[in-house]
Amino acid sequence: MADLQTQMKQAVADAAVEQIKNGMVLGLGSGSTAALMIRALGAKLASGELKNIVGVTTSFQGEVLAAELNIPLLSLNAVDRIDLAIDGADEVDPSFQLIKGGGACHVQEKLVAAMADRFVVVVDSTKLVDRLNLDFLLPVEVLPGAWRQVQKTLASMGGSAELRMAQRKAGPVVTDQGNLVLDVKLNGGIDDPASLEKSINNIPGVLENGLFVNLTDEVLVGEISDGVAGVRSLDRRPS
Ligand code: 5RP
């Protein structure tokens, strides 16, 4: 039996796949919850329950998994629209603003979410927060040659930024685009996600940050009640 957190993730992954209809172009997110969703999609394609699906992945992780499951893929440049994108998140606030990038995939994830007609976020209940960045650091993808300069600029904006280091590889995490990631802590959390998203992206050398503002249409939350995993769709509260 999977642990409780995995059961919650599986429940939301399965609920999200229920929203997929034949013929859709789908944005396939990254991370462990999105991977469960991709596996559930693969199973429905293999059984014939779903047909004529094309996926647009948001990471190398998704590409490898989709290939393993025989899910047809197109690149972002090859599609004009995405019907539905499904992805995980690291933090979700009451007005559906997100921090993403725990897997360093937020550049492609934001491109896909921004193109999608509908963006559904799948999380377990541990990801719900009242205020962003009190616990989870904000990922910022930077050009390798600019990380120290960006770190200094972030410090002048009140953010302490650490270079994300790799595990089982010497040195920093290198993203799918060949860049580095700074993980940023703002004192007291994030007041105004919309304005911070723009200010950080305006720093020379920054590719993208993990604030996803006004992109989310629905949040599906996995919860445990009486020892059983279930799913709740959240109502957005105005910011
Ligand atoms: C990757 C992401 C992931 O969606 C996020 O980190 C959540 O991952 P998980 O479902 O494993 O908790 O943004 O860049």
Image (cartoon, grey):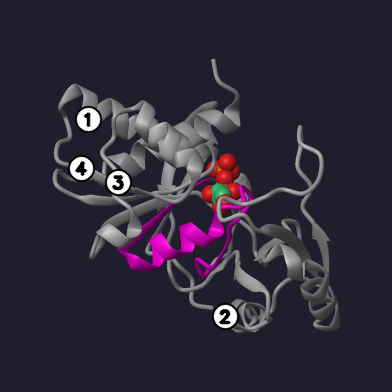
Answer with left or right where residue 93 lies relative to residue 187: left
Q: CA distance from mark 2 to mark 1?
A: 38 Å
The type of residue carrying mark 3 is: Gly
Camera-side mark, 2 or 4: 4
Q: Are marks 4 and 1 in contact (CB under 8 Å)?
A: yes
Q: Are marks 3 and 1 in contact (CB under 8 Å)?
A: no
Residue at position x 72%, y 62% in the image: 144
- Tell me the number on the disc at residue 53: 4
Q: Secondary structure at mark 2?
A: helix
Sequence-earlier tag: 2 or 4: 4
- Tell me the number on the disc at residue 194: 2
Magenta highlight on residue 118: yes
Q: Are marks 3 and 4 in contact (CB under 8 Å)?
A: yes
State the residue position of label 3.
55
Q: CA distance from mark 3 to mark 2?
A: 29 Å
Sequence-earlier tag: 2 or 1: 1
The type of residue carrying mark 2 is: Ala
Residues in magenta, as a range: 95-123
Sequence-earlier tag: 3 or 1: 1
The type of residue carrying mark 1 is: Leu
Residue 230 showing in the rendered view: no
Give 207 or 146, whichever is nearer the viewer.
146
- Tell me the number on the disc at residue 45: 1
Camera-side mark, 3 or 1: 3
Residue 205 x %, y %: 68, 75
Camera-side mark, 2 or 1: 1
Residue 18 x %, y %: 27, 40
Mark 1 neighbour class, 10 Å CA radius: few under 14, some 14 to 19, many 20 or more: some
Magenta highlight on residue 229: no
Q: CA distance from mark 2 to mark 4?
A: 33 Å
The type of residue carrying mark 4 is: Ile
